[in-house]
Image (cartoon, grey):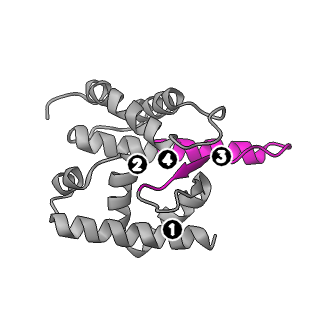
Amino acid sequence: MSEIPSELLNACYSDMRRMARRILLNDGVAQVIQPTELANEAAIRLLRSNLSQVSGQGHMLAYAARTMRQVLIDEARKGSAKKRQSLAMMTVLPEDPKDRLINIEDLDRALADLAELSAEYAQIVELRFMLGLSVAETVEATGLSHRTVLRRWQAARLWLLERLEHA
């Protein structure tokens, strides 16, 4: 793709805002950070970083998802570093039958643990949860078969839910 990174980021911005809304959809602490603020902070961090190796919109959105996750973790850490107790930032993992609220910091630790076990499974979670891609879109983004994506998503989601339940 011949787009320069700032133009590519601009083309992806509405998708970034959609991702931020999805991530914070069930956040009971909306006053901590709004979806637009999350997308803006991620965009600023991305512009400050080296994006020369970004190869297209899908690649840019993957970078954006990771950056948003880092922004949320930084915000959560800032809140817990304050003298008075701040409210935890929460989200919901898609397709959780119990619709449990999950602490963002706990989710980040669990995703890091999953990435150590299997980077491929962690990638599926990032694409499905952070980017909000459907199974078909994840198949297209990864080049894996539909069945493989489904199997990895189900296994990773169950592993995360189990891990978070015992956190």
**Tag nearer the camera, 4 or 1:** 1
87 magenta-colored: yes
- Residue 127 in the image, given as x and y percentages of width and height: 33, 52
Q: Amino acid at mark 4?
A: Arg
User: Residues at badges 2 and 4 in contact (C-beta under 8 Å)?
Assistant: yes
Quarter of the figure that contains the C terminus: bottom right
CA distance separating discs 1 and 2? 16 Å
Which range is magenta? Answer: 68-94
Residue 120 makes an appearance in the image:
no
Which residue appears at 41% of the width and 58% of the height?
Answer: 95
Residue 65 makes an appearance in the image:
yes
CA distance separating discs 2 and 4? 8 Å
Name the residue carrying label 1: 161
Is tag 3's residue or tag 1's residue first in the polypeptide sequence? 3
Name the residue carrying label 4: 69
Q: Secondary structure at mark 1?
A: helix
Name the residue carrying label 3: 76
The quarter of the picture where residue 56 lies is top left
**Tag nearer the camera, 3 or 1:** 1
Q: Amino acid at mark 3?
A: Ala
Name the residue carrying label 2: 130
Is tag 3's residue or tag 2's residue first in the polypeptide sequence? 3
Q: Secondary structure at mark 3?
A: helix
Are there few (<14), some (14-19), or many (20+) residues within 10 Å of tag 4? many
CA distance separating discs 4 and 1? 18 Å
Residue 158 to residue 71: above or below: below
Q: Secondary structure at mark 4?
A: helix
